[in-house]
């Protein structure tokens, strides 16, 4: 045997062990070439690449190199440490071996006896099938292990935005990110409070909340985030038959998560959970009722051409209540003032204080002339 060889070596990210390392493979391939009077033209190295597919950078670069006319007439052999370095797929291996054969180039393995004889071709098929079988069995074992872990409440994938991965199997699989988890929770709260998804995402951009991979948060990624039950501490994986509490802490309460789903789904039949958090910017939230559907209005701030404006509005969308906060409060004060002109009106206000106490108290602090509110 003699000629000009190109060498291909590969490891997957999990195979940096003795016998698989790139240095060992290249050394053994060069020694093989020396023993068989093959000059080494180039070495192509794929570090951290799986051979489950042929979509590997240096593997494709090798074939692009050989495909060049001037190289097809010079290169006589491709040398690998073992056939599973070349491919772990029977189909891919056959396709690329056929390409080499059409160019008159021979594939050789350092650790396996293969050639163009009938026995050599048979053994090539056997070694390729063994590599794929090993790969398929690993996938089954890995899948079974992951399913068992998920059934035990563990999250087995990259940590979603707002979480950090657990440090060991003895600890929860996820832990809330001390920096991002509060921002994710605030995003849920803003949408639940009636802020449009676009405005909530704009707020997230301003304060610097970015996607899991560092990209800018978009409305589509925010929508998927807000619909993910993992943030209320649950694993919901129908394809695996898993529906259970996770082994990790929730970032938002189930109630808040449910309110957000109502807003995102536009479900008019769902019962909105009343707001209990007092916000001095919206003192009438929980008091004003939508005249179309009779539900309590929420409030949020929207960005317009001339600045930002606060609105009371119904979460059920177009055609329902939407009124500027300053106009609503002005009308409310006018009603209170008209009631306070009579003793009966003042008595009605005192009796109804439990209904709109928060709004009355905050507005009373803004206007000194409504002195009879009691």
Image (tube, rainbow, N blue to C red):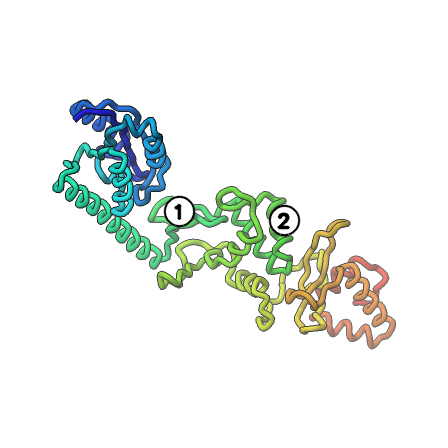
Query: Please, is residue 227 above or below residue 97 in the view?
Result: below
Q: Residue furthest bottom?
A: 344
Neighbours of disc 1 within 10 Å: few (<14), some (14-19), many (20+): some
Q: Is residue 271 left or right of residue 74?
A: right
Q: Quadrant of residue 345?
A: bottom right
- For the residue pair 341 and 205, the one nearer the viewer reads as 205
Q: Are marks 1 and 2 in contact (CB under 8 Å)?
A: no
Q: Residue furthest right?
A: 341
Query: Please, is residue 124 above or below residue 72 in the view?
Result: below
The disc label shown at residue 166, or none: 1
Residue 307: image location, x then y, percent? 75, 49
The disc label shown at residue 175, or none: none
- For the residue pair 316 and 256, the one nearer the viewer reads as 316
Residue 150: image location, x then y, percent? 35, 56
Helix, strand or loop status at disc 1: loop
Mark 1–mark 2 distance (CA, rounded to whole Å): 29 Å
Q: Quadrant of residue 7?
A: top left
Residue 90: image location, x then y, percent? 25, 47
Q: Considering only order in the chain, which callout, 2 or 1, is on the residue closer to the N terminus?
A: 1
- For the residue pair 82 and 365, the one nearer the viewer reads as 82
Of labels 1 and 2, the one closer to you: 2
The disc label shown at residue 203, or none: 2
- Quadrant into which the N terminus falls: top left
Residue 340: image location, x then y, percent? 84, 70
């Amino acid at each position: 045997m003699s000629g000009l060889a190109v060498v291909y070596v590969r490891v997957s990210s999990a195979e940096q062990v003795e016998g698989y390392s790139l240095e060992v493979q290249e050394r053994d391939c060069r020694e093989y070439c020396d023993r068989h009077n093959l000059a080494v033209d180039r070495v192509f190295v794929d570090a951290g690449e799986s051979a489950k597919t042929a979509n590997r950078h240096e593997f494709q670069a090798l074939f692009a190199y050989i495909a060049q006319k001037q190289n097809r007439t010079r290169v006589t052999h491709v040398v690998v440490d073992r056939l599973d370095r070349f491919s772990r797929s029977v189909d891919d291996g056959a396709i690329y071996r056929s390409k080499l054969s059409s160019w008159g180039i021979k594939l050789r393995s350092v650790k396996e006896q293969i050639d163009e004889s009938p026995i050599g071709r048979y053994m090539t098929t056997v070694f390729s099938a063994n590599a794929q079988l090993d790969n398929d069995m690993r996938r089954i074992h890995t899948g079974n292990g992951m399913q068992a872990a998920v059934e035990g409440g563990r999250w087995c994938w990259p940590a979603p935005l707002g979480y950090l991965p657990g440090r060991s199997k003895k600890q929860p699989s996820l832990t809330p990110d001390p920096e991002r988890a509060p921002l994710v929770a605030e995003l849920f709260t803003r949408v639940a409070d009636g802020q449009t998804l676009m405005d909530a995402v704009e707020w997230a951009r301003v304060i610097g909340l970015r996607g899991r991979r560092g990209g800018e948060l978009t409305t589509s990624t925010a929508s998927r985030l807000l619909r993910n039950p993992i943030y209320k501490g649950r694993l919901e994986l129908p394809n695996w038959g898993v529906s259970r509490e996770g082994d990790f802490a929730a970032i938002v309460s189930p109630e808040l998560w449910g309110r957000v789903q109502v807003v995102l789904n536009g479900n008019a039949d769902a019962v909105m959970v009343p707001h209990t958090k007092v916000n001095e910017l919206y003192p009438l939230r929980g008091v004003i009722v939508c005249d179309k559907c009779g539900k309590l209005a929420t409030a949020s701030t929207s960005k317009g051409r001339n600045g930002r404006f606060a609105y009371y509005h119904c979460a059920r969308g177009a055609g329902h209540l939407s009124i500027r906060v300053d106009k609503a409060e002005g009308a409310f004060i006018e009603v209170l003032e008209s009631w306070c002109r009579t003793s009966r009106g003042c008595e009605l206000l005192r009796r109804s204080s439990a209904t709109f106490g928060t709004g009355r108290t905050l507005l009373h602090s803004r206007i000194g002339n409504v002195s009879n509110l009691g």
